């Protein structure tokens, strides 16, 4: 690994208090129990810990729920990569509360809810494995989630497995906490059932990719113009603002909250940093299926009578997003765009190179 590559991903960490990056953090003896579990009587906490260890293992000996064959060596490699590169933000237990987390916006993902934002699966579903691989490889541009393209394929696959261990463990823990409340004994059969449900949810998501209802057109200025109209009339501008910059009252007063309990904002679509990726299909999926855990709703139903409007919106999002950076291959010539609110003379040049 070259020094510059190393600096690339270290950079946020250096900024956040010299946490160091090449050092492998010691593997914790135990995962930390969630607040819900800590509230239970001592004896019940012990039973819950045992059940969780039985299904998901310990940091030293992790187990992947529902894995067809046990892959202890892969999971240990994944844990080592995680303890080298991820825990500073995502926490040893995957609770999103690592030492660097508090200063970050958006917050690092708390994996334990099993909810992920940038998925190719329908709203409310688990992500597909390839979504997690992609996020780790490319990072989330415009946030502190770095790109880990420097990892080998084996390390990448292994660390994703380890994220799955932490996620499944967190989901099971949450479900068990509900089951355990007010009970004297933990019902072993019930725990088995809960574990199976989690595995089923993840397996189901694998085969449910969101694919466009109509094929992607070759974007022209007409698409952008229609997209702008839809943006202003279908509710987008209520959250993202008429110019897509997200300067709405709710946003500025931090009134929006995500499912993890943190303040969130409707994206500034003009920042040039689309968190979920800037391929047309990525943007299509964000609009069609919404963004899990956030106020961004799905528009699948609202636009079911006019599915091609989604592509219009995609072309418009690409257009406003490209205004501050040059990606001529994707941005149509928007010469006929009607009364765009912020169109200084220079603004059009980013789009001007289109077609
Ligand atoms: C410097 C802090 C930082 C480090 C280091 C970091 N992450 Fe993240 N990660 C984040 C932030 C912040 C987000 C949330 C981005 C968002 O909500 O848009 C995130 C989100 C994620 C997500 C969820 C994406 C989704 O669709 O919801 C995954 C998976 C993930 N990170 C995996 C990893 C892995 C694996 C590593 C180590 C190889 C890692 N991260 C290292 C900050 C970090
Ligand atoms: C109720 C508020 C709300 C409405 C209505 C809404 N959005 Fe969003 N949108 C959000 C929030 C919040 C996010 C940021 C989610 C996150 O990553 O945390 C977002 C994110 C997005 C993203 C992803 C940006 C990225 O960084 O990848 C796109 C694209 C988007 N919205 C487009 C639209 C379009 C098009 C419409 C109308 C059809 C729309 N939104 C309507 C709240 C809203």
Image (cartoon, rainbow, N blue to C red):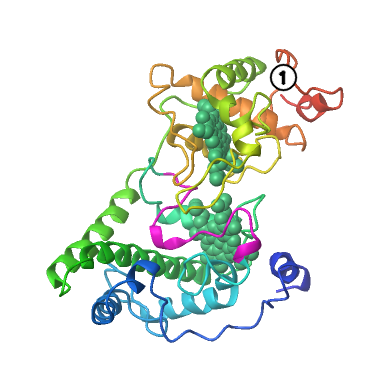
Q: Is residue 119 magenta?
A: yes
Judge by depth and name the residue closer to the eye, 185 or 141: 185
User: Can residue 223 be seen in this snapshot?
Assistant: yes
Residue lying at 69% horizontally and 24% vertically, measured from the top left: 332
Where does the image place residue 218, in percent across and percent down from the top left? 59, 23
Quarter for ligand 1?
Answer: bottom right
Can the viewer see residue 280? no
Q: Quadrant of residue 64?
A: bottom left
Position of residue 291 relative to residue 229, above or below, is: below
Quadrant that contains the C terminus: top right
Q: Which residues are magenta?
A: 101-120
Task: Give the x, y percent position of residue 295.
Answer: 49, 39
What residue appears at the point 48 percent right and 52 percent down from the top-left corner? 261
Vertical arrangement, residue 217 with respect to residue 85, above or below: above
Tell me what residue is drawn at x 65 percent, y 58 percent.
144
Secondary structure beneath dot 1 equals loop
In the image, the residue with mark 1 has its CB under 8 Å from the nearest atom of ligand 2: no
The part of the image, by quadrant, that contains residue 209 is top left
Residue farthest toward the right in the current orientation of the protein: 345
Q: Nearer the viewer, residue 213 or 193?
A: 193
321 lies above or below 53: above
Quadrant of the image containing the N terminus: bottom right
Q: Which residue is mark 1?
A: 334
């Amino acid at each position: 690994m070259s020094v510059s590559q190393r600096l690339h991903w270290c950079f946020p960490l250096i900024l956040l208090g010299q946490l160091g990056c090449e050092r492998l953090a010691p593997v914790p003896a135990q995962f930390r129990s969630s607040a819900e579990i800590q509230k239970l009587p001592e004896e019940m906490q012990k039973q819950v810990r045992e059940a969780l260890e039985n299904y998901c293992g310990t940091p030293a000996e992790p187990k992947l729920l529902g894995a067809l064959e046990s892959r202890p060596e892969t999971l240990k490699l994944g844990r080592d990569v995680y303890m080298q590169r991820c825990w500073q933000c995502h926490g040893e237990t995957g609770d999103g509360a690592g030492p660097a987390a508090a200063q970050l916006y958006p917050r690092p993902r708390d994996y334990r809810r099993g909810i992920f934002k940038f998925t190719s699966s329908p709203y409310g579903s688990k992500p597909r494995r390839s979504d997690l691989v992609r996020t780790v490889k490319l990072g989330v541009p415009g946030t502190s989630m770095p790109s880990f393209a420097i990892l080998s394929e084996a390390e990448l696959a292994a660390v994703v497995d380890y994220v799955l261990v932490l996620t499944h463990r967190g989901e099971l823990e949450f479900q068990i906490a509900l089951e355990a409340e007010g009970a004297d004994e933990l019902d072993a059969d019930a725990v088995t059932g809960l574990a199976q449900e989690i595995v089923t949810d993840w397996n189901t998501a694998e085969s449910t990719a969101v694919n466009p209802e109509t094929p992607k057109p070759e974007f022209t200025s007409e698409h952008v113009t229609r997209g702008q109209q839809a943006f202003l009339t279908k509710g987008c501008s209520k959250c993202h603002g008429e110019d897509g910059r997200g300067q709405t009252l709710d946003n500025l007063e931090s009134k929006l909250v995500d499912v993890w309990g943190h303040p969130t904002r409707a994206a500034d679509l003009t920042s040039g940093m689309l968190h979920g990726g800037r391929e047309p299909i990525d943007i299509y999926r964000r609009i069609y299926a919404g963004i899990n855990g956030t106020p961004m709703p799905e528009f699948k139903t609202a636009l079911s009578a006019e599915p091609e409007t989604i592509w219009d919106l995609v072309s418009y999002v690409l257009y406003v997003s490209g205004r501050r950076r040059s990606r001529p291959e994707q941005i149509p010539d928007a010469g006929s765009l009607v009364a765009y609110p912020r169109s200084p003379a220079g603004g059009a040049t980013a789009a001007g190179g289109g077609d």
